[in-house]
Image (tube, rainbow, N blue to C red):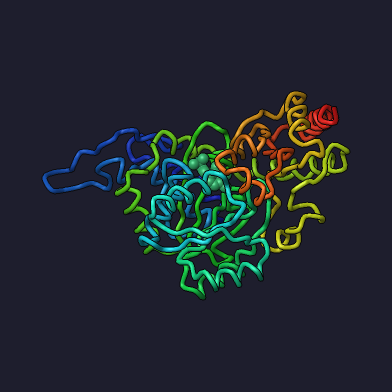
Amino acid sequence: MTEFSSLTRVIRAGIETDPAQGAVVPPLYSSSTYAFKAFGERREFDYTRSGNPTRAILGEALAELEGGAGASVVATGTAAMTLALITLLEPGDLVAYPHDCYGGSWRLFEELRAKGHYRFEAVDFTDTEAARERLRELRPSLVWIETPSNPLLGVTDVRAIGETGHELGAVVVVDNTFLTPLGQRPFELGADVIVHSVTKCLNGHSDVVQGAIVAKTEELAERFDWWSNVLGVTASPADSHLVLRGLRTLHVRFERHQRNAVEVVDAIKDHPAIRTVYFPGLETHPGHELAMRQQLGFGSMFSIDLAGGEAAARRFVEGKRLFSLAESLGGTESLVAHPATMTHVAMPPEIQALAGITPGLLRFSVGIEPAEDLIADLRASLDAALG
Ligand SMILES: *Cc1c(COP(=O)(O)O)cnc(C)c1O
């Protein structure tokens, strides 16, 4: 028998598996609890915190997409990060994380550090040799990688950094939110664990918050499932039902997102209002060659630093019509964010400066609208930014 492709299996996840009515699309099982067959005879599911049929189909589809042994589907991307840390670390263990990571990751690490649970050290992973040297000094138990990074799209060499982490006995975790399994294959690059903010591209319609943690091995997958129930961070069945629907179109959405991003960046990159464009698809981007080698595409995110600073950013935002001023990313609608006052506001100004977040920086999530409309709107807003 022919083995169907992984993509086909994801598009058809749970299709025609309903034992009761033969529903083509798997029904939403919202019940919190499940009757035992008889005294002492448990069915496959007993209580939705520990397991749920709808969430289980989604978990299998996510594991299939990443090529992992299993996936735990949890309430938010942040819950997935928390689950990873609590499951993998002992008190006092050291985590090496990227100096320019997502603001919420930084806040989580910082607050757990302040409580004395674990130790955290920020490392610039985009300079591979210096980062390997630093890791050998630090000897972390866990290496946390986020690539491309948020919001400057710095690219980390997952294979090289992961190898050094493994030499030191560390577990290697990759936050693969920005590129999705269709844009980057962390397990093939040596990662042990992948975390996702499912909220973003995987759901893709900005109507759910959810997270997932995918394990390379069966043993790790079981530990994550165990701890997600212990901590009570598992995702709701209704959200899982919506995400399953979103996931079936991920490949067509993501192709359009990526194509739009390349076209939009190409059309605006020389605009006089812009000082720097951050997009791994540009030859001038410091991570371009690595991205060409390591990624399957350039993703749907780019940032620009406006020459006129915060005043220009304000004029841009007041002039735009299509890009909604909002946090988050990966939805069908295009968004713009001002990291210094939005996504990265939790970072004090000096840490923002170290991460390269300037007052004139704007971050874009390119949606799937026709590219010519996005380009027209961006050009008009950039003209407005000039003042
Ligand atoms: C949004 C995001 C998260 C956090 O996910 P939530 O679903 O908002 O909790 C983590 N990492 C990255 C890269 C993100 O963009």
Residue that appears at 58% across and 38% down:
345
How many numbered tags mark residues here? 0
Residue that appears at 62% across and 45% down:
251
Q: Nearer the viewer, residue 229 or 145?
A: 145
Q: Tell whether 375 sits left or right of 65.
A: right
Residue 3 appearing in the image: no
Write down the quadrant of residue 337 in the picture: top right
Q: Nearer the viewer, residue 369 or 74?
A: 74
- The spot of residue 116 in percent (x, y) is 39, 54
Q: Tell whether 383 sits left or right of 131.
A: right
- The spot of residue 292 in percent (x, y) is 73, 60
Q: Quadrant of the C terminus?
A: top right
- The spot of residue 41 in percent (x, y) is 16, 48
Write down the quadrant of residue 174 in the picture: bottom right
Q: Tell whether 308 sits left or right of 68.
A: right
- The spot of residue 15 in percent (x, y) is 46, 42
Residue 62 appearing in the image: yes
Residue that appears at 55% across and 50% down:
8
Q: Measured along the vertical axis of the image, is residue 273 above or below residue 118? A: above
